[in-house]
Image (cartoon, rainbow, N blue to C red):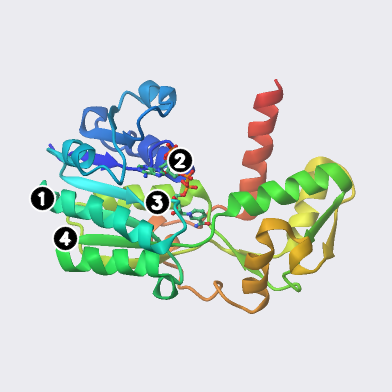
Amino acid sequence: MTTYLVTGATGNLGSRITRQLTRISPVEAITALVRPGAETSHLEDLGVGIVRGHYEDLGSLRHALGGVTRLVLVSSPILDPTARVRQHRNVIEQAVGAGVEHVVYTSALGAEHDPGHFETEQALERSVPSTILRNGLYSEPFARRALNEAVRSGSITSSTGGHPVRTASWDDLAEAACLAVTAVDPQSSIRRLNGTPWTYDELARHLAARLGRSVTHQEVADDESGPLGQLHALFRHGLLTQSPDELTGMLRRAPRSIEVVVDALLGDDTRREA
Ligand SMILES: NC(=O)c1ccc[n+]([C@@H]2O[C@H](COP(=O)([O-])OP(=O)(O)OC[C@H]3O[C@@H](n4cnc5c(N)ncnc54)[C@H](OP(=O)(O)O)[C@@H]3O)[C@@H](O)[C@H]2O)c1
């Protein structure tokens, strides 16, 4: 039986990868790596195995990777590139030692300019067959911020200068990771994954329709655009929108649009309020 270990399984992406994996593989074959003390009821409900470990704790990684055939390494959220590479190398070295046959790694578009991701990709290429998924920016933080602004004031802000934004949803990126790790004969490759472009004017129109109120889009300076200001600046300069359409190719369908992501957030909000 091919066995799978998913890291970061309590996070936005890893939890979705784990859940989607249960739809295509027996739960007995799936183990989720979680940090000591992490809350795991959502994973227990799925019926997958749970193992505790930390990217800095070699013994815990060795234990977690014993008997694993294929690994999904969800990148560490730590921002310091040196620490990030160290943590990822720890996982890769223990995976190689345990005889893992294939690693799927969630990298990022533009990894060539991001040492934390790029050095991890190189470590993988040197040591184990791997699929490197260079993920686009997540749609959800953009949709969530706009939704909150629209509800609060009827005006959403960006500093994109009207340029298109290109992002991908957690669910689609999770599905791609599942497809990559369960492929019949996975080949080492780098895949550039992103959703379809959208603009803040389109997002305002959709929010107005869904909320049943006037919602306008207002251009502001980067520093008035909150934590997304720096990312808006990238889109204003035409970056991160040029990647090939490999997500559509992998999913064999169009990725979820920003409108679908907004609707999912509204659905979640409705369920919470009920
Ligand atoms: N494409 C994008 O827009 C974007 C945006 C942000 C981040 N990222 C990258 O994509 C990754 C996945 O995104 P996400 O939204 O799923 O992140 P997330 O929700 O923050 O999840 C990160 C996961 O990594 C686990 N983790 C953190 N440090 C660890 C350690 N030292 N040892 C073992 N596990 C550890 C966390 O466990 P706990 O639950 O215990 O904290 C959590 O399960 C991030 O970690 C980051 O590298 C991408």
Q: Nearer the viewer, mark 2 or mark 3?
A: 3
In which image quadrant can residue 125 be found?
Answer: bottom left
In which image quadrant can residue 9 be found?
Answer: top left
Q: Which residue is mark 4?
A: 128
The amino acid at mark 4 is Val
Q: CA distance from mark 4 to mark 1?
A: 10 Å
Tell whether circle 2 marks a residue whose Cβ is less than 8 angstroms from ligand 1: yes
Q: Nearer the viewer, mark 4 or mark 3?
A: 3
Q: Which residue is mark 2?
A: 11
The amino acid at mark 2 is Gly
Q: Secondary structure at mark 4?
A: loop
Q: Nearer the viewer, mark 4 or mark 1?
A: 1
Q: CA distance from mark 4 to mark 3?
A: 19 Å
The amino acid at mark 1 is Gly
Tell whether circle 3 marks a residue whose Cβ is less than 8 angstroms from ligand 1: yes
Decide if residue 246 is on the left or right side of residue 26: right
Mark 2 crowdedness (10 Å alpha carbons): few <14, some 14-19, many ≥20: few
Q: Earlier in the sequence, mark 3 or mark 1?
A: 3
Locate residue 171, reporting x and y percent.
48, 46
Q: Which residue is nearer to you in this view: 161 or 121?
A: 121
Q: Which residue is mark 3?
A: 76
Q: CA distance from mark 3 to mark 1?
A: 20 Å
Q: Earlier in the sequence, mark 4 or mark 2?
A: 2
Residue at image x 39%, y 70%? Answer: 115
Q: CA distance from mark 2 to mark 1?
A: 26 Å
Residue at image x 51%, y 58%? Answer: 254
Q: Which residue is nearer to you in this view: 217 or 73?
A: 73
Locate residue 123, reporting x and y percent.
23, 65
Q: Is residue 206 above or below residue 201?
A: above
Q: CA distance from mark 2 to mark 3?
A: 10 Å
Q: Which residue is mark 1?
A: 97
